[in-house]
Amino acid sequence: MESTATAVRDSSGIEKIRLLRQNNRVGKLHHHAYMARDMEATRHFYEDILGLPLIGTWVERTNPVTGQPDNYVHTFFELADGSCIAFFQFKSADSSLAQSVNKFDDVNPFAHHIALTVQGKDTVRYFKDRLAKAGVQAFETDHGYCYSIYFHDPNGMQVELTTLVPETDEMMGAAGSTAHETLRRWLEEDDLATNNTHRGAGWVEA
Ligand SMILES: [Fe+2]
């Protein structure tokens, strides 16, 4: 029987990426956690606008970081694959603010964002419309290998909703074959040309 290493070596493109994925010991995202300024506003945003059900609310009276008595809540909003977007809010607003990485100001996408998958550009635009009706502005970006909108949640966290596109497999297959070489060259060279040949317009305020 062909060994996994041989199968990976003899494959290429998207098939190689799939084989590597099957042998990855680290599985899907369990949760991503962030500080909430206002948990009810956060619940409304994720549950009522984006449709992620609140599936768990844990009240914690001991802080595992300090080992001291405390009072905070930890909530979990579930994605379609069973992973979650999670939040903390402390009973003390000062404590929440002090421990928020962005002090609840709007974060720029390079500092931090989380990208969640949706199915197709129609769904991207469905959510853009829902967000607009709720007074949340979202910007479209064509990354070439995926198509996205970006917006801020009530805590200033930037969220991206993105869909795969017909070119995704071909582009990711090619990228997977050259990823190490491209990284080595970018680190060594000061003016390496882009290899994202399909990137479209930047921020499209449509
Ligand atoms: Fe992203």
Image (cartoon, helix red, strand yellow):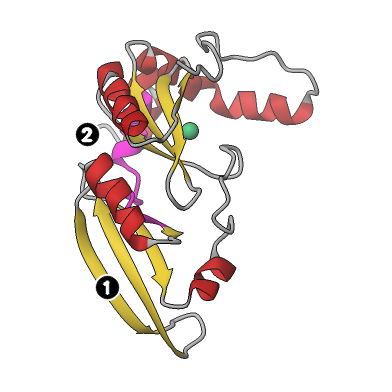
Q: Residues within 10 Å of mark 1 (few under 14, many from 20)?
A: few
Q: Is disc 1 placed on a helix, strand or loop? A: strand
Q: Are marks 1 and 2 in contact (CB under 8 Å)?
A: no
**Residue 28 relative to residue 108: left or right:** left
The amino acid type of the residue labelled 1 equals Trp
Range of residues picked out in magenta: 16-33
Quarter-of-image position of residue 54: bottom left
- Closest to the observer, 176 or 83: 83
Q: Is disc 2 placed on a helix, strand or loop? A: loop
Q: Position of residue 135 (x, y in %)?
A: 39, 35
For the image, the number of numbered tags is 2
Q: Position of residue 177 (x, y in %)?
A: 49, 21
Residue depicted at 49% across the width and 72% down the height: 93
Q: Which residue is mark 1?
A: 58
Residue depicted at 35% across the width and 55% down the height: 41
Q: Which residue is mark 2?
A: 1
Q: Is residue 144 above or below residue 119?
A: above
Q: Residues within 10 Å of mark 2 (few under 14, many from 20)?
A: few
Q: Nearer the viewer, mark 1 or mark 2?
A: 1
